[in-house]
Image (cartoon, rainbow, N blue to C red):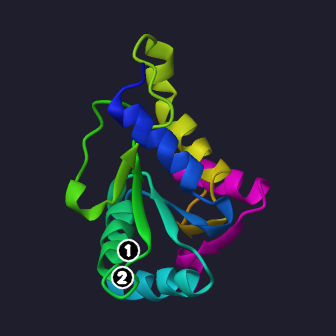
Amino acid sequence: MRSSSELRFFYFLQHMEREKTAVFIGHSNCDLSIEKISPVIEGEIKNGVKYFLNGGQGAFDRLCARAVYNLKSKYPDIKNILVIPYSNFKIFDKSLFDEIISPNIDYNSKKAYKSAIPRRNKYMIENACTAICYINHISGGAYKTYKLAEKKNLFVINISIEK
């Protein structure tokens, strides 16, 4: 029998449409303002994006979570989804999110725990068509995820280039 959180996750997967889903990818340090990111997110909403996948780590993710949350007053149908990599992940502010899901929790494997963040990132890329990014150097997990988004032919918007 599946737990209620597993059932919610499978329900979400059945209703999320890849073509209407964006993922946020960014370094943990970010000096953008909400005034800079909100118009980019709103532009994607106007292009049909309804679901926003957020990894919940670092300044860029926090900024994007708040921006989507604020835009919900104007666009109530959008969904702010936190994708956690493991069960004891520290969530910075649950109230910002409509759903909290974890696609790859494996409670029985230390190896799975170590690879949880890259696996979570891969899941988000594979379930999105657009990547809204803040990548300003060529190292780290965010950069690797950005490169995967390019390889998987997502529509990539790198805000740091436009800065």
Residue 67 horizontal/vertical position (percent)? 35, 76
Q: In which quarter of the image is residue 35?
A: bottom left
* CA–CA distance in space, label 1 to label 2: 5 Å
Please say whether residue 95 is one of the residues in the magenta stretch: no
Residue 24 horizontal/vertical position (percent)? 50, 62
Q: Kindly identify which residue carries mark 1.
A: 68
Stretch of the chain drawn in magenta: 142-163
Kindly check if marks 1 and 2 are in contact, taking CB atoms under 8 A apart as contact: yes
| Residue 57 visible somewhere in the drawing | no
Whether 108 is drawn above or below 79: the answer is above
Q: Kindly identify which residue carries mark 2.
A: 71
At x 53%, y 52%, the residue is: 142
- Amino acid, disc 2: Leu
Q: In which quarter of the image is residue 75?
A: bottom left
At x 49%, y 49%, the residue is: 12
- Amino acid, disc 1: Val
In the image, 147 versus 91, the foreground residue is 91
Residue 19 horizontal/vertical position (percent)? 68, 66
At x 78%, y 61%, the residue is: 153
- Graded by Cα atoms within 10 Å as few (under 14), some (14 to 19) or many (20 or more), the crowding at tag 2 reads some
**Is the magenta region chiefly helix, strand or loop?**
helix
Whether 114 is drawn above or below 53: the answer is above
In the image, 109 versus 12, the foreground residue is 12
Residue 143 horizontal/vertical position (percent)? 59, 54
Whether 33 is drawn above or below 125: the answer is below
Please say whether residue 148 is one of the residues in the magenta stretch: yes
Q: Quadrant of the N terminus?
A: top left
